[in-house]
Image (tube, rainbow, N blue to C red):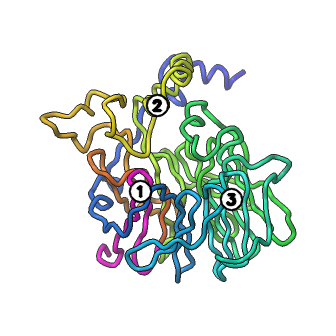
């Protein structure tokens, strides 16, 4: 009863869960051109996830497993469905999620399947979108939604989905532990001493799950929707935000009648919703500040798509950010990894593999 009254008051006054404000990008989040000025290592349609173990780096693009070799991506293996997540163990075991519905573990990159996961905890996988080895025998994974597959992430956002979960799979025994459930789109997981970090995209936060003390928030009220993570040398981690928030989208999410009609009647490409890339059609929705003036789109216009990578300290402080602003092209950053002294990122919106030298920025 008390919660119902609180929710009613928030709706009446436009505060709390009913607020449509978006955090300002300032301080360590101040916009820059780092991602737009990054070296383009390779171009490949459908680039999505990354996986490496220090000596080698793999990328996924549709059903293809690709290996980075110098300045090009070489096809290593082709699967029978699109790869929705990748992971590589320290000793070279490969884990792949296919179409979000099954996870395979192989003894090596070109080896045979040694284990398979399709229906953990009596609930089928639907949107397995991030994997991470914790040692050689345990695999952490996020299943973003129980209703929408990986490619339908925007449908889950518009449906206010809250059916995601984080799992720990003991590969040898087959046991699966549910770390967290009923999440608003789980997308990204990273092992840490004593537990795991995971992203909850639609609540704009990163959580820490620690077995003795339960789950607590580490990073909250982000200006974007967080996704996959990667360990950072020297401590902390890198976090990709695959799209950014706007007040207009926040408003639509709080208007059920309008949102229901929009989803039912409008082509998804033209919803008032975030996207991995934009500026490709005059039919795309615009806010006033997003209208071009004298043929120029202002970099501070409300972002329908955006590129954002954060470096986060172990205590949850954002210490650095890398941007591709509204007028840039390297949007939709869905994965990051440190490799050979640089940060490598996939821009799914542009189909480009980017490299940012870390030593030069120290």
Viewer-side label of 1, 3: 1
Residue at position x 82%, y 59% in the image: 176
Q: Position of residue 305 (x, y in %)?
A: 38, 43
Viewer-side label of 2, 3: 3
Kindly identify which numbered label has been placed on residue 351: 1
Boundaries of the magenta span: 338-362
Residue at position x 15%, y 37% in the image: 295
Side of 19 relative to 109 (left or right): left
Residue 314 is inside the magenta segment: no
Residue 340 is inside the magenta segment: yes
Q: Residues within 10 Å of mark 3 (few under 14, many from 20)?
A: many
Query: Can you say which quadrant of the picture contains the C terminus?
Result: bottom left
Kindly identify which numbered label has been placed on residue 141: 3
Residue indicated by mark 2: 250
Residue at position x 47%, y 73% in the image: 338
Q: Earlier in the sequence, mark 1 or mark 2?
A: 2
Q: Position of residue 279 (x, y in %)?
A: 31, 39
Side of 127 relative to 158 (left or right): right
Q: Position of residue 218 (x, y in %)?
A: 56, 55
Q: CA distance from mark 1 to mark 2?
A: 27 Å
Name the residue nearer the viewer: 115 or 251: 115
Q: CA distance from mark 1 to mark 3?
A: 24 Å
Side of 169 relative to 109 (left or right): right
Side of 179 relative to 73 (left or right): right
Q: Earlier in the sequence, mark 2 or mark 3?
A: 3
Q: Residues within 10 Å of mark 1 (few under 14, many from 20)?
A: many
Q: CA distance from mark 2 to mark 3?
A: 28 Å
Answer yes or no: do the residues labelled 2 and 3 have beta carbons within 8 Å? Answer: no
Secondary structure of the residue carrying numbered label 1:
loop
The image quarter in which residue 72 lies: bottom left
Viewer-side label of 1, 2: 1
Kindly identify which numbered label has been placed on residue 80: none
């Amino acid at each position: 009863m008390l919660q119902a009254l609180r929710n009613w008051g928030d709706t009446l006054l436009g505060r709390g869960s009913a607020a449509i404000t978006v955090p300002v990008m300032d301080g360590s989040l101040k916009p820059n051109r780092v991602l737009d000025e990054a070296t383009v290592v390779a171009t490949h349609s459908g680039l999505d996830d990354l996986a490496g173990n220090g000596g080698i780096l793999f990328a996924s693009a549709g059903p293809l497993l690709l290996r980075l070799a110098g300045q090009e991506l070489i096809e290593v293996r082709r699967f029978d469905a699109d790869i929705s997540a990748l992971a590589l163990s320290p000793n070279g075991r490969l884990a792949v999620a296919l179409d979000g519905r099954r996870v395979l573990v192989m003894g090596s990159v070109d080896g045979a399947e040694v284990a398979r996961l399709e229906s953990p905890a009596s609930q089928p996988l639907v949107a397995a979108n991030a994997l991470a080895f914790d040692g050689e025998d345990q695999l952490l994974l996020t299943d973003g939604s129980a209703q929408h597959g990986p490619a339908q992430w925007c449908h889950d956002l518009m449906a206010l989905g809250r059916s995601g979960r984080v799992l720990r799979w003991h590969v040898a025994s087959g046991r699966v532990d549910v770390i967290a459930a009923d999440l608003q789109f789980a997308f990204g997981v990273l092992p840490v001493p004593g537990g795991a970090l995971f992203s909850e995209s639609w609540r704009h936060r990163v959580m820490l799950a620690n077995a003795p003390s339960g789950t607590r928030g580490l990073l909250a009220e982000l200006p974007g929707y967080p996704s996959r993570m990667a360990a950072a040398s020297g401590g902390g981690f890198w976090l990709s935000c695959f799209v950014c928030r706007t007040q207009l989208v926040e408003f639509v999410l709080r208007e059920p009648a309008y949102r229901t009609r929009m989803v039912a009647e409008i082509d998804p490409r033209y919803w008032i919703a975030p996207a991995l890339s934009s500026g490709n059609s005059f039919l795309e929705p615009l806010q006033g500040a997003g209208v071009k003036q004298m043929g120029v789109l202002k970099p501070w216009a409300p972002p329908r798509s955006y590129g954002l990578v954060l470096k986060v300290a172990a205590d949850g402080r954002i210490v650095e950010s890398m941007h591709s602003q509204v007028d840039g092209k390297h949007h939709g950053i869905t994965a990051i990894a440190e490799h050979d002294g640089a940060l490598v990122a996939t821009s799914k919106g542009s189909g480009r593999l980017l490299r940012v030298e870390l030593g030069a920025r120290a």
